[in-house]
Image (cartoon, rainbow, N blue to C red):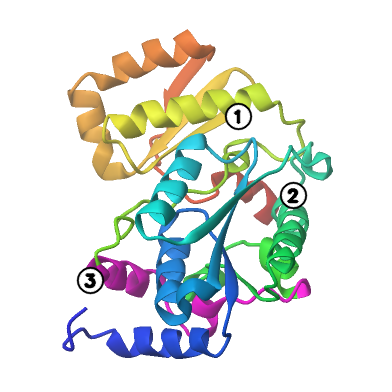
Amino acid sequence: MTTLDPYQDDYKRLLEYLRKLSQAAVAFSGGTDSTFLLWAAKEALGENVLALTVKTPYIPDWEIEEASLFCKRNNIRHQILTIPFPEIIRNNPEDRCYRCKKQLFERLLHEAAGSGITTVLDGTNADDMHDYRPGLRALSELEIKSPLLESGITKAVIRHLSKSIGLPTWDKPAYACLLTRLPYNRPVRENVLTLIEKAELFLMLADYRSVRVRVQDNAARIEMDNDLMPRFISSGFYKKTAVYFKSIGFQFISLDLEGYRKGSFNTTIEK
């Protein structure tokens, strides 16, 4: 980062916040926000930072692998906590995010305490306050700290600073857990989560990065950024996609002409 960086004061403010903690554990998913936070925490706290990554059936394996690789390359202490599917969210309730975060972060607090660490951080940023995020209530109840939010740092600033630092996640698309691909208030089958992971990875490996595969019954509805659609159609890749999706178990495949929308199943709640 150069001294002329317009956001250097934001980064300095974040480092000052973190240095006051003396030690901390970071809830690390491998996404843009948590990677940036973990990097800053490592710079501020050195060996007194611990990365904690949760592995559940609704987190894709490739994200866990990326998180592990980042920590290895940067000599950051890292623990992966394997947790079975929480039965409290088996029916994908509307307050799923709250129930999930409450249970998972209780586990993170327990693991951190086992390493003598009392403070757990998460990567919520200032823009997250404008979205439907019931999980924020769980973080507040458990007194999880959100340094990016408390420092007023937005997603755009995180991406800019991540690029300046040289973090590989600076342009990584947002990626929510696989449960967001399913309608609310229906039982979740773990084999369906596996199909969704395979389907999205197939598209991402073909350089369609900003995608979601929403699933209802045997139908897969593909959401992607609008600027990706012309290539998807004109290249004929939609045909290969249909063949692959059917080969793994989907009966009906469609492309959503409205494009990618964050949490599109949330419209049923808002109404």
Under mark 2, the amino acid is Glu
Asked if the magenta segment contains residue 142, the reply would be yes
Where does the image place residue 71, in percent across and percent down from the top left? 43, 55
> Residue 81 placed where, x, y %?
65, 48
Report the residue at 43% width, 31% height from top: 200
Of circles 2 and 1, the one toward us is 1
**203 on left or right of 110:** left
Q: Mark 3 belongs to which amino acid?
A: Ser
Q: How crowded is mark 3: few (under 14 residues within 10 Å), some or many (20 or more)?
A: some
For the residue marked with disc 1, what is the amino acid? Answer: Leu
Q: Is residue 216 visible?
A: no
Span of residues in magenta: 141-165
Q: Is mark 3 on a helix, strand or loop?
A: helix
Which image quarter: residue 182? top right
Q: Which of marks 2 and 3 is in front?
A: 3
Q: Which of marks 1 and 3 is in front?
A: 3
What residue is drawn where x is 36% and y is 83%?
A: 11
Of 223 and 23, nearer the camera is 23
Q: Distance between the residues labelled 2 and 3?
A: 38 Å
Q: Residue at x 26, y 35 (%)?
A: 207
List the residue tagged with mark 2.
94
Q: Residue 164 carries which label?
A: 3
Q: Residues within 10 Å of mark 2 (few under 14, many from 20)?
A: some
Q: Main secondary structure of the magenta part?
A: helix
The answer to whether residue 125 is visible is yes
Q: Closer to the N terminus: mark 2 or mark 1?
A: 2
Q: In this view, does 144 lie above or below 251?
A: below
Q: Which of 60 and 254 is in front in this view?
A: 60
115 on left or right of 215: right
Disc 1 marks which residue?
193
Name, please, the residue furthest toward the right: 88
